[in-house]
Image: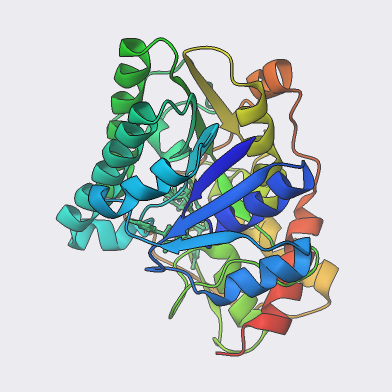
Amino acid sequence: MKILVTGGTGYIGSHTVVELINAKHEVVIVDNLVNSSKDVLDQLKEITDRHIDFYEIDCTDEKLLEPIFKNHQFDGVIHFAGLKAVGESVVMPLNYYHNNVLSTIVVSNLALKYQVKKFVFSSSATVYGDQEVPFVETMNLLPTTNPYGETKAMSERILRDVAHANKDFKVSLLRYFNPVGAHESGLIGEAPNGIPNNLMPYVSRVAKKKLEFLSIFGNDYDTPDGTGIRDYIHVVDLAKGHVLAIEKLKDSIEVYNLGTGQGVSVLELVHAYEKVNEVKVPYKIVERRPGDIASSYANPNKAFKDLGWKAEKTIFDMCKDAWKFEKHYQEK
Ligand code: NAD
Ligand code: WQD
C-alpha cells in the first residue's frame, strides 16, 4: 500500500515508518516539524536504506496539503500529527483544539475527496478518564482532565461520524497506553525539548546526570507500592500494531487498545531501569501531580483477537532501548 504518514518525523510516527517499510509499504511523510527535526529523515534512511518522500506542511492547512493527495494516490493515511503535552494544553487550550481537531478534519476531508479508503488515528488511553482497570474498548469515554484528552475524544467522535456517513471510508482508532523505548539501532527515539514531562525520558536524563533526581509524584495511591501504575509499551511494538491495523482494516469503524495489559509502578520502572542499565536513578517522593490517576492499563485482547497483535517486548527491553538512545543521541 501507499501510505501517508502525518507526523511521520515524530516519535511514534518515525518508528511506524520503519515498520511500514519493513512490511513493504510505500510511505510519504508530512510534518510541520513543530516537535521534531529533519535529521530524523537521515536516521530513517540509515535504518531503512530507502529515500522517503517528505513534505514540510502543516496539516491544518488544507490548501497546502491538497496537492500531496492529488499527486499521490494513497491507499491509506495514518494520522499522527498532533500536539501532545498535557500541561501545555491546559495553558494553551485553543492551540490544542485548533491543531489537533482541525488537522483531523482537514486530513480526513482530503482523504474522502481523494478516495483514500483507510484511515488510522492516534488516540490515547486518556479518553477512558479515571475508571476501573483494565480499560476495555467497550467502556464509555469519560471527560478527561485536560484539553489534550478532549481533542482526542473529539477527534474520535468526528471520525466515527465520518465513517458512518461514508460507507467506503474505514477508520481505526488506536488508543495507545504509555509508549516508551526506542528503535534498537539507537538512531531514533523520544527526544523532548527542554525538561521532559514524561517518566521514561526523565529517568533517562537523571541516569545520564543531566538532571539531579527524579521526583516521584506521590506514593500514597491505592496501588501495591503506592506509586502510580501505567501500561508502558515499547514503541516498536506499538509501531507494528499500526501496520496490522491498516493492513487488516475492514469494518467501518474499529477501536483498539494498544497496550501490554501489564501494569508497572513508577518504582518498578525505576528499579528495572537501574538493573538492566547498571546506572543509578536517585529519586525523591513529592506531592501528587494534579490530574494523575492511580492506575491505567489495557485489556489488549481485542487487538490480539482481530489483528493477531500483541506486545512482545518487556519492561527491561524498554528501559534498555531508552538508555541506548539517551546515551548516543541526547547530547543537549
Ligand atoms: P511527537 O510530538 O513526537 O510527534 C507528533 C508529530 O506531529 C511531530 O513530529 C510534530 O512536528 C507533528 N505535528 C504536530 N502538529 C502538526 C501539524 N499541525 N501538521 C503537521 N505536523 C504536525 O508525538 P508522538 O509521541 O509521536 O505522538 C504521535 C501521536 O500519538 C500524537 O497525535 C499524540 O497525541 C498521540 N499519542 C501519543 C502518546 C505518547 O505518549 N507519546 C500517547 C497517546 C497518543
Ligand atoms: C507516568 C507515571 C506519573 C513523571 C501521559 C499523558 C497521556 C499519554 C501518555 C498522550 C505517572 C509518574 C511522571 C515524573 C513521576 N500521552 N511520573 N515523575 O501521565 O500516564 O500519561 O503520557 O496521549 O495522555 O497524560 O505519563 O510518563 O507523564 O507518567 O512520578 O517526573 O509516572 O505520576 O504515575 P501519563 P507520564
Reply above or below: 188 against 326: above
Where does the C terminus fall, quadrant-wise? Answer: bottom right
Q: How many marks?
A: 0
The x and y percentages for residue 297 are 58, 36
111 on left or right of 281: left
Q: Quadrant of residue 24?
A: top right
* Quadrant housing residue 269: bottom right
Residue closest to the eye, 9 or 303: 9
253 versus 53 height, above or below: above
Q: Residue at 62%, 29% (x, y): give it.
A: 245
For the residue pair 260 and 93, the one nearer the viewer reads as 93
Residue that protrudes farthest toward the left in the picture: 94
Considering only vertical position in the picture, is 311 above or below 95?
above
Is residue 210 at least partly visible in the picture? Answer: yes
Left or right? Give the position of 168 relative to 211. left
Image coordinates of residue 148 in percent, x first then y, are: 30, 48
At x 70% / y 74%, what residue is drawn?
325
Question: Relative to 274, is 182 above or below?
Answer: above
Q: Residue at x 40, y 42 (%)?
A: 70
Q: How is the image coloured?
A: rainbow
Q: Position of residue 25 (x, y in %)?
A: 69, 41
Check the picture and name the quadrant holding the N terminus: top right
Q: Is residue 129 visible?
A: no
Q: Name the foreground residue: 20 vs 222.
A: 20
Q: Nearer the viewer, residue 274 or 40?
A: 40
In the rendered image, residue 263, in percent from the top left (x then y), is placed at 65, 41
